[in-house]
Amino acid sequence: STPERIAQVELDLQRALDAGYQLLESGAPAHEAVVAAIHVMEDAPEFNAGRGAALTSDGIAQMDACLMTGDGEVGAVTGVSTVKNPIDAARAVKEQTKHVLFADPTDAEIADWGVATESNEYFITEQRRQSLAEAQSGGDEWEKHGTIGAVARDSSGNIAAGTSTGGITNQMPGRVGDSPLPGCGTYANNDSVAISCTGIGEAFVKEVAAHQVSDRVLYAKEEPVEAAKAALDGVARHHGDGGMIVVPAHGEGAMVFNSEM
Ligand code: ASP
């Protein structure tokens, strides 16, 4: 990464935080803040979500997202290729259907949910094209992350978590990672934590990482930071690396990672 790119990423992260905080300060619920923060990062081309998503081996942006609130309600989508802000589709699944997870929802379903769409070209950046070309000529893009997430606690004490991703560069079409799977890459429970993960999704799925952090806090009475480190050690045993952001129902949040990104 160049210093200019790092500066841009930091600026966009600040804009995402500001968007979320502004809502929380005005009394909005946690999930509204999560969605607002995620919108900023999905729209910014630096991150592996929305515009700038990682590309599959056939050069398509195929995105996943999940939104969960601490009351146990959750919605997710996987394999969307035209939803401008995939977190909006996840939210629509949560709020407008009786289901939890849609794989490649139809155009009619997407239109029904009232979420904005774009052609797949909109999501594809030159940087991601280059990353795909490098990966396909033997480079190791597998190790590069960039999935985005947000966690929040509101003035009523409710918590929420959201995650949005393009997956992993050069992944096989149809591959699903941890991000849209409740309990793996995203989880929220008002009695324990809201958590969003990034990293090698397969390892987070095998470890059921997000739910594990919640259980450690809820039943083993571990501090969130301790719980997240332990779950990440489990992820490492499955040869995965990455990071987690955690906001508990009470007390201090945690940010834990074992990868540079
Ligand atoms: N966890 C995401 C996935 O496996 C990728 C990432 O975090 O960069 O799809």
Image (spheres, helix red, strand yellow):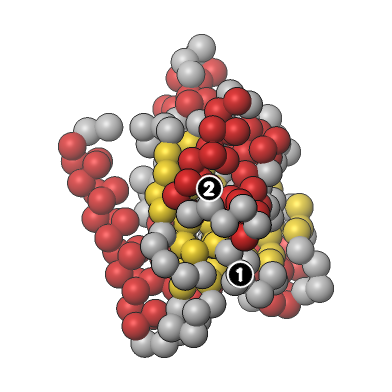
Viewer-closest of 39 and 206: 206
Q: Which quadrant does the C terminus fall into? A: top left
Tell me the crowding category of disc 1: few under 14, some 14 to 19, or many 20 or more residues within 10 angstroms, Cα based. Answer: some
- Does residue 185 lie above or below 251 as drawn? above
Residue 40 as seen in the image, left or right of residue 222: left
Residue visible at 63% across and 26% down in the picture: 238
Q: Which of marks 1 and 2 precedes in the sequence? A: 1
Instruction: Give the percent coordinates (x, y) of residue 181.
Output: 69, 51
Marks 2 and 1 close (CB-CB < 8 Å): no
Identity of the amino acid at label 2? Answer: Ala
Viewer-closest of 257 and 101: 257
Counting the numbered discs, the total is 2
Residue visible at 41% across and 59% down in the picture: 253
Quadrant of the rendered structure where residue 17 is?
bottom left
Residue visible at 30% across and 69% down in the picture: 18
Tell me the crowding category of disc 2: few under 14, some 14 to 19, or many 20 or more residues within 10 angstroms, Cα based. Answer: many
Viewer-closest of 182 and 148: 182
Residue beneath disc 2: 227
Residue 111 visible in this rendered orientation of the protein: no
Q: Which quadrant does the N terminus fall into? A: top left
Instruction: Give the percent coordinates (x, y) of residue 224.
Output: 48, 54
Identity of the amino acid at label 1? Answer: Asp
Residue beneath disc 1: 191
Instruction: Give the percent coordinates (x, y) of residue 240.
Output: 56, 29
Viewer-closest of 119 and 76: 76
Tell me how far mark 2 sits from mark 1, CA to CA.
15 Å
Residue 93 as seen in the image, left or right of residue 121: right
Q: Residue furthest top?
A: 138
Label 2's element?
helix
